[in-house]
Image (cartoon, coloured by chain):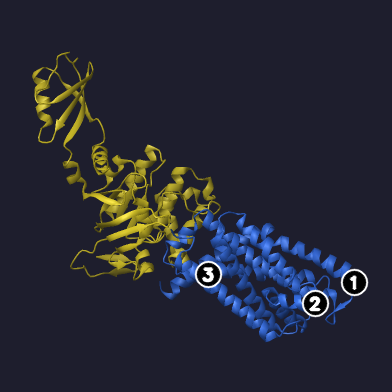
Chain colours: A yellow, B blue
Amino acid sequence: MHDYGYNGALVFQVMPTRMIPALSIKNLSKVYDNGFEALKGIDLSVQQGDFFALLGPNGAGKSTTIGIICSLVSKSGGTVSVFDVDIDVDFPGAKKHIGIVPQEFNFNQFEKVEDILVHQGGFYGMPAPLARERTEKYLRELGLWDKRNVPSRTLSGGMKRRLMIARALIHEPKLLILDEPTAGVDIEMRRSMWDFLKKINEAGTTIILTTHYLEEAEALCRNIAIIDKGKIVKNSSMRDLLKQLHREVFILDCVEELPEDLSIEGFTTHRIDNHCLEVAVEKGQEINQVFQQLDAQNIRISSMRNRANRLEEMFVSLVEGAA
Amino acid sequence: MSLNEQFIAFMTILRKEIKRYLRIWTQTLLPSAITMSLYFVIFGSLIGSRIGEMGGFTYMEFVVPGLIMMAIVTNSYSNVVSSFFGAKFNHSVEELLVSPTPNYVILLGFVLGGVTRGLFVAVVVTLVSLLFTRLQIHSYFVVLVVVLMTSVLFACAGFINAVFANSFDDISIVPTFILTPLIYLGGVFYSMDLLPPFWAAVSKLNPLVYVVNAFRYGVLGVSDVSLGFALSMIAFFAVAAFSFCMYLLNSGTRLRQ
C-alpha cells in the first residue's frame, strides 16, 4: 500500500495482517438533555473501501450517529473508532481520517468559494501552497473552478452541495461521510455527483451515505444499515437485503392488446389498461414463467419495469415491521 | 496535530479574523476613530479647558489614556463577540469543530484576532489624540503589558458572550448595559480621589478601574491604585476569563449537542 503525505512524498505502508474497519461503533447511545433517547446502543462496522448506506426515517438517529462520529454531538455511552483510532483516546487523530458533508449548508456565506477551501485546509494543518493546489484540484473536479472568486452565497443549491463535498475532501480523508448530499439537487446534477462519488470510492475512499433517495442508495452502495427509533433494524449487504424481498411487482408493456380474460397460472395479475399488465412475482417464482405463458398466448412484451424501487419496498417493510 | 500543523491552523484563524475586520473597516475601525475624536473635542478641548488640571495634568492629558483604553476594550470585545457568534449563527464554526485543531488553538486564534483589532484601533486613536495634545510615554513596558493583558481579557469576555448568545440582541446587550457603564465608571473621565469613600470602595470591584489606572500610569506616571495591584488584578481576570473560555470549548457548552 502507499499513500501521499501532505508534502507530496510517496510513503510506503506495511500491509496490515488484518483489515482494520474504517468505522467501528459499539453500543453507542445518546440521550439528549430533554430526555430523548436518540440512540439505544447501536453496533455498526464499516469496512475499508466500502460504499455504505445508512438509511432510516426522519428522527431515526442517522444525523445523531454522524454528529457523534465527527464531534458535533457528545455521546452518552459506547465507543467509536475510526481506522482503529478511538475517539475517546485521540479524537484529533480520528478527525484527520474523516471528511464530513453535512445536511445543512454550514459555511460562511460571505466568504469566497476559494477561501472556504483554503481555510479548511489550514484547519487541518496543511501548508498554504498545498491547500491552494488541492483547492484548485477539487474545485475543477466538481465544476466550481469558474466560481472560485464569488461569495458562496451567490451559488445555486447544487453548487453549494458540491462546495461542501470539495471542502470535505480538501485533506483527502480516508472516510467520507455524506449526510443527504443530493437533497434538493436536480437529477442531472445528482447523477454527476454519483459518478464523482463512485470515482473517489474506486480510488480507495470509504464512503458512508445517508439519503432519502433510496434508488441512490441502491445504485451506489454495497452494504447497508437501516436505523429506526435509535436501533439498527437491518445490517447486511445490499444484495442479501434485496434477496429477502418476498414479492416484487413488475409492470409489463405489451405490444398486442391484452384479452379481457387474461390469466397467468400461478401469478397474481392486474390489468392496468389494454396494453399494460401488473404481475406479482413471489419469492421462488421466476419471471420467465410469465414470459412463457404470455408468449403462448401470442402476447409480446415491449418493456418491463419494477412498480416501485426494490429497496424502497424493503425499507418500508422493515420500518413498518419495527413500528 | 504536530506543533507545526497547530501553528498553521492558528495562523489560518488569525489571518481570517484580520481579513474580516479589514474588509469591513468602515464598521470596525472608522467608528472608533470618529467617536474618540468627538470625545477629544468635547471633553478634552471644550469642557476640559474649563475643568482645569486633574492629577497634575491638563484634563485633555488626563483623559487621553482612558479613551485609548476604552477603544481597545470595546474593539477587542466586539471583534470576538461578533465574529464567533456569526460563525455559530451560520454554523460555519462546525468547520473548526470537526477539524483536528485543538481547542486552545481555536481560542487563541479568535482572541488574538480581537487583540490585533484592539491594537490597530489603539494606534489610530493615539494618532488622532496627537492632533489635540502631546503624549509622553512614562513607561513603554507598562503600556505594552497593560494593552496586551487588557485586550486578551476583553477578547475572552467577548468569546464568552458569543458562546452564550442566542441572538444578535444578546451580543449587544452586554456591551450596552454592562461594558459601557463599567468603562464610564472606571475612571476614564475622573480621578477616583473625587469620589466619596463608599463609591471609591465600590469602584474597586470594577476591573476597568485597574485597566484605566494601570494604563494611565504607563502614559502619565500617575495612578489612583497601586500599579502592582492593578497589574495583578488584570492578570487575574485575564487568566480567569481564558480558563473559562477553555472550559466552555472543552465541555462543548452551547457548541456541541
Which residue type does callout 1 highlight? Ser
**Could you tell me which quadrant the N terminus of chain B lies in?**
bottom left
Circle nearer the viewer, 2 or 3: 2
Instruction: Identify whether B89 is placed above or below B148.
Output: above
Residue B186 visible (yes or no)? yes
Q: What kind of element bears circle 2?
A: loop
Per the image, the residue denoted by label 3 is B245
The chain letter for the residue carrying disc 1 is B
Specify the amino acid type for callout 2: Pro
Q: Which amino acid type corresponds to the residue marked 3 in the rendered image?
A: Cys
Per the model, the C-alpha gap separating discs 3 and 1 is 44 Å
Look at mark 1 in the image and give the residue it sits on: B49
Q: Label 2 near label 1: C-beta < 8 Å?
A: no
Residue, disc 2: B196
Residue B18 appears in the picture as rendered: no
| Viewer-proximal residue among B245 and A141 | B245
Chain at numbered mark 3: B
The earlier-in-sequence mark between 1 and 2 is: 1
